[in-house]
Image (tube, rainbow, N blue to C red):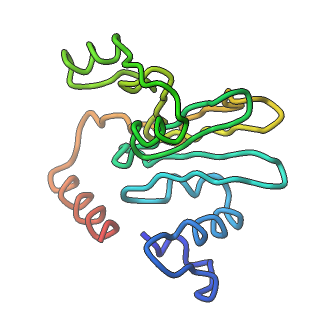
Amino acid sequence: NSGELEGVQRSERPRGDTSAAWFGRARDRRDRGLFTKLRGEWAVVEYEPLSKSVLTARDMVGCLPLHYEAVGGNCLVFASDPRQVLAGTGLRVDLDDAAMLSHVIDCYTPSSRSLFYGVRRLLPGTVNRWRADRGVDPVSCEPFWQVPPLRARVAPGELEEELRVLLHQAV
């Protein structure tokens, strides 16, 4: 939904497959509510040099994964796959037995755990922030979106119209 980011001039848009730089400039011009306006699959890792902080965010449904691990007292490694995180750290691979059991039984790994010990995943619809002076634990971890409550009664045709509007916005 690039229309949400039209405030960014065409000359500032990056070339290539990624729109990360474009997103960063657009985010600087908008409030944190920008995340709720984005549609589709996305994950963001952004370093902010002035505050020496790292911001991570993930789409509302969690289509694109974002895994991370703290290495030592001042290093964070990020990747879309936990194996890439482990390759980036050079640490020994240890399976998280409890997460593995949950994955086998429920076909799901709970909370922010991954199948590998120490490697975490950012939950869908969540923003984390780290600061260099605070070590590798997130300074804040907060959801920017929640599933809307169900409506008790719906007028005939209302859902069809809402679906039509949402599909039009998505395309």
Q: Is residue 34 above or below residue 154?
A: below
Residue in front for this viewpoint, 61 or 115: 115
**Left or right: 78, with 156 as reference point:** right
Task: Name the one closer to the observer, 78 or 21.
Answer: 78
Number of residue marks: 0
| Residue 7 or residue 42, whichever sits in front | 42
Q: Residue 70's image quarter?
A: top right
- Where the N terminus falls, by quadrant? bottom left
Picture residue at 39% right of the left edge, 42% below the top:
81
Q: Position of residue 94 (x, y in %)?
A: 41, 19
Q: Position of residue 164 (x, y in %)?
A: 23, 65
Position in image of residue 59 (x %, y %): 43, 49
Left or right placement of residue 162 versus residue 21 in this view = left
Measuring 55% from the left and 72% from the top, which residue is drawn there? 5
Give the side of residue 17 with respect to residue 127, left or right. Answer: left
Residue located 54% across and 46% down the image:
57
Residue 155 drawn at (x, y percent): 20, 48
- Quadrant of the rendering where the C terminus is positioned: bottom left
Q: Is residue 59 left or right of residue 34?
A: left
Residue positioned 26% across, 13% down in the render: 101
Among all residues in the image, which is located at the extreme left?
156
